Each structure stands twice: as structure tokens, then as C-alpha cells.
Image (cartoon, rainbow, N blue to C red):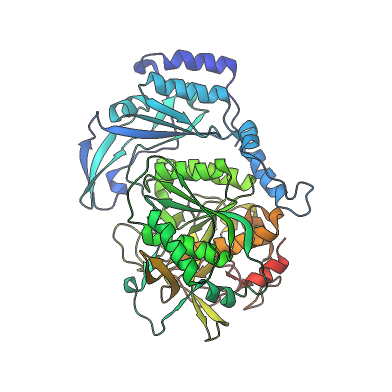
Amino acid sequence: MKFLPLSGVTLLVATTLLSAAPAQTVWVNTATQGISVNLLDRATDLGPAPGTQAITLRVALKMRNRSTLISYVQQINNPASPKYGESLTPAEFTAAYGPTSAQVTSVVNYLKQSGFTGITVEPNHMLISASGTVAKANAAFHTKVERFNQYGDVVYGNTTAARVPQALGATVGAVLGLNDIGKMKPTMVTRTQVATPTYAVSYNPQDFWKIYGNGSTPAASNATIAIIAEGNVTQVIKDLRKAEATFKLPQVPVSVIQVGIASPDTSGLDEWDMDTQYSTGMAGNVKRLYIYTGSSLTDTDLALEISRWATQNLAKAASASLGICEFFPFIDGSMLADDNSFLEAAAQGQTFFASTGDTGSFCPVGAAANGVPAGAPFVNYPASSAYVIGAGGTTLLADSGDVYDKEVAWYAGGGGISQFEYAPYWQVNAAVPSAPANSKGIPDMAMDADPYSGANVFVNGSWLIVGGTSLSSPLSLGVWARMISAKPKLGFAAPHLYALYNGTVTPGTYPHGGYHDIIVGANGLYSALPGWDYTTGLGSIWVSQMYTHIK
């Protein structure tokens, strides 16, 4: 859909409407819907939130000329196109596809008139942050913010849709921050969290090189990558240095980028440890590792973090071992904001990997046990986003010489059909089963995730064996870093990964190389089959073969 800039006449109407009394205002809905207590697991409505409660909002604006940008992404990733290998700069994106200065000004003025302070606009004009109170938010967006008791914690959320005056309807896409319920969760799993099988192995980075057939594929010395994290990551860097020394790997340059207010939280240490150690470890080396760390894992704070990764365009590939049932970001509007960031990144030649989750063909609800086939029949976001590579999970087995033996679809690896995201053209062209219904299927690909064939990770200086699709995502990032380091024209990964597969499969192999076709195992509703499937997607990467064939 195209969103055109507001005309001078419309701006005049906007000024009139925004200065009018609330009773005279014509309100229109945004993508931020109301949150009913019935949508929340084990929650009790406690009534209106105090009007004086402080709140930080992020207003997500609509992208201009979106369909044109989607077409551009297709062209720059097609080796037969004269535009192949091109990419936009953030400034070029803003000029052609970001909201106009007039549109931004109209929203900023409205926030000021509504009593909000600390208003900041992201460089691409797509997000505007502002500080205020619940009372101001209720009035400015014609909504009601209430409190809930959920799992013993008091949280808040808007029980009616967020609306804006009609004059802003063509500009404002969603209003984030009206709830603190939507929080993404890391997808790391330890061996104690799953049933004990009859085997138990663990791997170092060099083991993964051998098992996944790295061969002579060069290290990613020219690639810049990023990890999406939260809280204080000081210990993460210390643990990375110990892992590098232990595994005799190069010490990679690290830059920490704080997004939003710094948080002292270290509860995600083990997750960020695995992400950093096995992205750079699988890559062999990188030009620089960026760790983006935010204030919290709420939808609104992560939206700012993802946006900042795209707008800075410092890292050409990133991984987030995080996920949430996709219905929630759809309801609260963060899906709209994040999808725009992912599309911008794709046009700039950037790739985002995300874990598909560790509860099989269902997404976790409440305190659902790992891998138990119970929960909501949705897939995890952001792995389900059209412009994100969803990394699923396998159980990886090799002989004593680190020679690949086989992989089985990990029973807890996330996979299924998105209810909200469309099938991108590369899935349609590859005849992915969900494509006829115009829905994205995940995972896109898979790597080791079973904690009983997991990774040796340093956490607080000590050795821990862990897994989950929190492992498969950074492993995938590390492999892709090797590809773009040597072949920088590759840009955004998805079209190139799917171009290696044409839907015609000989069991156990693909016609163009680059993948191990996994045909054994299940994750609940879905079974591994020859070709693309809802447990392992395209399969796991055979590194040297992919390096030879991808273009």
C-alpha cells in the first residue's frame, strides 16, 4: 500500500482539528488494538491505571511508497537485474520512503499540544518517542489504559484501540508503549529443561565448522554483525574473551550500542553469551561485533532497538534469539513498526535472523513447559516476519571425528504457518506449502538446537552446555557472515537462500547444493519431509556447498 505525503490543504485541516475540543474530533483507528483480559493468560483486570503513572510512547508512522520499496528489494537481489548488488543508504531510504518532514511535524505538534515532553524523532522519521502520563495518553489517543494482575505481577495495557484525529490517520500507523504486557522471551534451553534422551554430546565452534562442512570457506573477516540484547552486557564481553582464548579464536572488536535508558539487568546473560560466542565463533572472525542493548524486552523498547539497528546500518547482519506469540505484536501494533524496520534493512542489504522458539508447533502461553505440544496455535514473532530469516532447530549427530552423521528435526523446534504475515515472493517461487494461502511458513532454515547436542558456552566464566533455537539463530548468522564477507553483493539473505531450492527434491539432497535435507523427526503438528517443511524449512546449511553455489 502506498502512503502519500499530506498536502498543504490536509495540513490546514489537521491544524484545525488538532486544536479543536475532543468532543469535536473525528477519531480513526491505528493498528494498535485494545487488549481484553480474555486475551491474557491467568490475568485479572484491576481497573483504570492511575492517571499520574508515567508512560513512554513510541508513535510508529506509516512508510511511503512501500510497494515500490518491495519491488526494489526484489530487483537488487536478482542476479539477472541491472540493479543487482545495489542497496539504499539510510538517507536515501528516508528521502524516498520515510514520512515527510511535514508529516513528522504534524505528529510532533500533536504530541506537544497533548502535553507530552522529551519528544525525539528517529533519523528515518519512522518512530517518534515521547514521555507523558497515562491520563495524557488516554486523552491523546482516545483509549483507556487499565491495570492487570498476571502471574502475580501488576501490568498495564490499553483496553480499547488507540485512535488519532482523522487528519493524522494517513500518517500514524501504531502507538506503542500503551502496554508493558508484550515482552519477548529468550529461547535458550538447558539440558535440565527437557527430557533426557539416550545420547548426550556438545560442541565447540570448531566442531560446528567441521560437522557443517565449512571446508575452505573463508572466515568472515570483512563482515559486520550485531546481536540484539538487553540490560548490562559487561560480563558478556568478558565471557566472549574467555571463549575466544579457550577455543583459540581471534579476539573480535566489540562495540556496545545503548538504546534507550541503560538497565542494570543481567538476567539474560547466558542468552547474550551464547549469541555472541556462537555467532562470531561460527563466523571464524568478524570485522566488528555490535551489541545493541535496550532498556527492556517490551515490544516498545525492542521496536526502538530494531529500528536503530536498521537506521544506523553499521551491521549487515544481526541475530535476535527472542520471540513472542505473533498475535500480540499484531494486536499492539509493534508488528507494523518492526516489519517496516525489517523491510528498510532488506533494502539496505541487511539481514535479520530470529529464533522460531522452543515449544514446537505452538507458541508458549504463560508457564507452558518447554516442548510440550500445548499452547496457542500461532508461530513466534519476529521469526514469522516476511523480511526476517526464521531459524528453526535440529538434533545434530556426528561421529568422533566431527564428520556429519545426521540431523533430526528437534521435537521442540518452532515451526508452522503465520496467521498475520504474507508469504514473500521467494517462498512463493520455491513452492513452499503455505504460499498458496499467501501466508509465510517458518522456519526458513534450521541448525543445531537440541541441548543434548548443544554448545559449550562460557557464562560468568564457567562452562555451560545449552541449546534451543537461541543457538540455531547465531549459528545461522555466523554462516551468513562468511557468505557476505566474501560475496558482498549478496545483500539481504532470503532471496539467495531460497534460490538454491526449486521445490524439486531427491530425498536426502537438494539439486543445487547448500543444504542438508532433513527428513526425520517432528515438532508436534508437523513432520520433517523431503524438501521444505514446517520443522526445518530449507534444511541445515552445508557451508562449503552453499559458498560454492550461492549468488
| Above or below for 422 versus 88 | below
- The residue at 37%/58% (across/down) is 269
- The residue at 50%/62% (across/down) is 473
Place of residue 328 in the rendered image (x, y in percent of width and height, measured from the top left): 39, 48
Between residues 500 and 280, which one lies in front from this camera angle?
A: 280
Quadrant showing the C terminus = bottom right
| Above or below for 320 versus 154 | below
Which quadrant of the structure image shows residue 480?
bottom right
Total numbered labels placed on residues in the image: 0
Place of residue 455 in the rendered image (x, y in percent of width and height, measured from the top left): 45, 72
Place of residue 241 in the rendered image (x, y in percent of width and height, measured from the top left): 46, 63
- The residue at 56%/75% (across/down) is 518
Q: Is residue 143 left or right of residue 337?
A: left
Between residues 463 and 215, which one lies in front from this camera angle?
A: 463
Which quadrant of the structure image shows residue 505?
bottom right
- The residue at 51%/42% (across/down) is 307
Place of residue 59 in the rendered image (x, y in percent of width and height, measured from the top left): 44, 33
Decide if residue 274 is in sight here.
Answer: no
| Above or below for 298 versus 271 | above
Quadrant showing the N terminus = top right
Decide if residue 136 is in sight here.
Answer: yes
Which quadrant of the structure image shows residue 26?
top left
